[in-house]
Image (cartoon, rainbow, N blue to C red):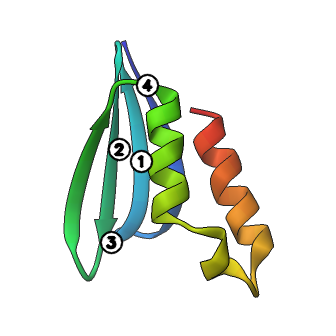
Amino acid sequence: MIKKHEIYKKDNWNMMTVEVQGKYIVLREISDQWGEDTHTFLSRPALMHWANNRFPKEEFQNNEEEWHQLMAAFKEV
């Protein structure tokens, strides 16, 4: 059974979804600049490590609320 989580969605070209497929966690990141990028993780800690590196808190200095919402969405996976 596949369980799908939507991390964020701004429009059809700027979105991120996570699917839990058995023991695998598949993250799909779609952007209007880079197209689609897929990452596969074997554990939730690996996913959170990637998320913290991909979205460093320093980049959200003026908008910490958005960073907290993003990290909360990853933790719900």
Residue picked out by circle 1: 17
The circle drawn on residue 68 is none
Between 36 and 67, the one nearer to me in the picture: 67
Rounded to the nearest angstrom, the CA distance separating label 4 from label 3 is: 27 Å
Q: Secondary structure at mark 2?
A: strand
The circle drawn on residue 27 is 2
Rounded to the nearest angstrom, the CA distance separating label 3 from label 1 is: 12 Å
- Is label 2 in contact with label 1 (beta carbons under 8 Å)? yes
Residue picked out by circle 4: 43
Q: x, y (%) of residue 25?
A: 37, 30
Rounded to the nearest angstrom, the CA distance separating label 2 from label 3 is: 15 Å
Q: Residue at x 56, y 32 (%)?
A: 77
Residue picked out by circle 3: 13
Rounded to the nearest angstrom, the CA distance separating label 2 from label 4 is: 12 Å
Q: Residue at x 65, y 34 (%)?
A: 76
Please tell me which of labels 2 and 4 falls first in the chain: 2
**Against 22, is 20 above or below?**
below
Q: Secondary structure at mark 1?
A: strand
Q: x, y (%) of residue 17?
A: 42, 47
Q: Residue at x 35, y 14 (%)?
A: 23
Q: Secondary structure at mark 3?
A: loop
Rounded to the nearest angstrom, the CA distance separating label 2 from label 1 is: 6 Å
Amino acid found under the numbered disc labelled 3:
Trp
Q: Residue at x 58, y 68 (%)?
A: 56
The residue carrying pointer 3 sits among few (fewer than 14), some (14 to 19) or many (20 or more) residues within 10 Å by Cα, namely some
